[in-house]
Each structure stands twice: as structure tokens, then as C-alpha cells.
Image (cartoon, helix red, strand yellow):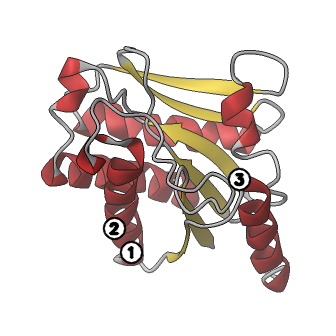
């Protein structure tokens, strides 16, 4: 079992310097800064449990998806599909954590729900969690395009907090991102071990 952790909004050769959502102009006020932190702690927590983790953080989304598919093809003898997490942070003043999955994927729904259960239990600043089906034809299309090119892997787009929500901003510290990343890892681990 491999978990791919993709820190999106950075490393795109076409949209250089793009840092995603922000609540200020400094680098430590941007989505890319905080997704890098929670993704690091998520990966370390999974590695401590002997889960193989591959970090992806460069190229266009299509190039990243192609690379994941290529790596998965090399491991095609694995009895279980891998997991792909497209890491983001939301903006727009919302008050919830969202895990988006391909609306056609039952396993994606289960993975997203497992992550949300752990986030709701462990991260008190996040009071509402949502497991949201995504597709190409409605308001969820941006989340869908973050994962649509991934083939065999069970894929979700993680938007675990809102960067411009005052209560969520209390998590925008190294300790807060560690707590969030470890909670998400617990959810991924729960999903993997329940299969």
C-alpha cells in the first residue's frame, strides 16, 4: 500500500510562484506554506506505521497524476489500490473541513469519511467536517480536477480548514499543522486497516 501526498499550489512550471489562498502577503500566510507543513506531519505519521509514502509536489496536475499512475503501474501486483491525497487549504470564510472525492468512487467516500472522523475527534478548532462528492459539472469541479487524472488510486482533495476563518487561523502554527496532519494520517490509517 502506497500513500501519495501531493502538496498542490506549488511546483507548477506554468503557474510559477503560485501559493494558493492567503490571508496576507507574507509566505507564512499562504496555502502552500501550511499544506507543506500538514503534509509533512501526515507523511511522517504514516511512515512511523510502516506505510510507504511518496511525496509529489511538482508539475502540472496532469503531470502529477501521470506520475502517480506510472508508479502504480510498476506496483500493479499489489492487491489493494494506493491512496492519493491532493493537499489544499480552503478560503472564503467557511467554517468546516472538507474532504472531496470523485462522486463515482465508493472507496473515495469511505476514505474521506475516515479522515473527517479523526479530524473531528482530534482537532477541536474544526467543529464541522464534510465528506463531499465532486464532479466536473458543479461547484465541486475544482476539487474534482485535482484528482480526476489519478487512475487506480483512491483519491481525495483535502481542504481541511479555511485560511481566512478566525478560529481555524489558531491552527496556523507548526503545532497546529502537526495536530492536523497526524489526525488526517490516523484517518488514512483507519481506512487502510479496515480494508
Element carrying mark 2: helix
Q: Residue drawn 82% across and 60% down?
A: 152
Q: How far apart are the two marked residues, 2 and 3, measured between alpha carbons?
A: 19 Å
The secondary structure type at the circle numbered 3 is strand
CA distance separating discs 1 and 2: 7 Å
Question: Disc 1 versus disc 3: distance between alpha carbons?
Answer: 19 Å
Is residue 1 found left or right of 150 in the rendered image? left
Residue at the spot 75% in from the left edge and 39% down from the top edge: 145
In the picture, the disc for residue 149 is none
Q: Are marks 1 and 2 in contact (CB under 8 Å)?
A: yes
Q: Secondary structure at mark 1?
A: loop
For label 2, the residue is: 45
Query: Is residue 40 at all visible to an observer of this figure?
Result: yes
Among the two numbered marks 2 and 3 on one chain, the one whose residue lies closer to the N terminus: 2
The disc, 1 or 3, on the residue closer to the chain's N-terminal end is 1
Relative depth, front residue between 62 and 75 = 62
Q: Looking at the image, is 24 positioned above or below residue 83?
A: above
Quadrant position of residue 4: bottom right
Residue to which mark 3 is pinned: 154
Q: Which residue is mark 1?
A: 49
Say which quadrant the C terminus sits in: bottom right
Amino acid at each position: 500500500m502506497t500513500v501519495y501526498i501531493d502538496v498542490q499550489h506549488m511546483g507548477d512550471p506554468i503557474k510559477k510562484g503560485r501559493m494558493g489562498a492567503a490571508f496576507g502577503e507574507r509566505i507564512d500566510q499562504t496555502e502552500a506554506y501550511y499544506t507543506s507543513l500538514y503534509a509533512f506531519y501526515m507523511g511522517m505519521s504514516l511512515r512511523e506505521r510502516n506505510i510507504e509514502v511518496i511525496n509529489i509536489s511538482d508539475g502540472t496536475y496532469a503531470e502529477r497524476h501521470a506520475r502517480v499512475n506510472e508508479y502504480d503501474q510498476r506496483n500493479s501486483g499489489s492487491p489493494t489500490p494506493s491512496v492519493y491525497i491532493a493537499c489544499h487549504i480552503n478560503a472564503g470564510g467557511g467554517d468546516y473541513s472538507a474532504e472531496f472525492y470523485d462522486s463515482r468512487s465508493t472507496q473515495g467516500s469511505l476514505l474521506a469519511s475516515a479522515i473527517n472522523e479523526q479530524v473531528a475527534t482530534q482537532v477541536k478548532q474544526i467543529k464541522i467536517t464534510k465528506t463531499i462528492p465532486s464532479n466536473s459539472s458543479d461547484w465541486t469541479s475544482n476539487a474534482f480536477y485535482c484528482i480526476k487524472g489519478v487512475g487506480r488510486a483512491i483519491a481525495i482533495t483535502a481542504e481541511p480548514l479555511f485560511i481566512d476563518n478566525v478560529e481555524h487561523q489558531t491552527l496556523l502554527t507548526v503545532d497546529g499543522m502537526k495536530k492536523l496532519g497526524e489526525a488526517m494520517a490516523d484517518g488514512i490509517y483507519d481506512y487502510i486497516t479496515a480494508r
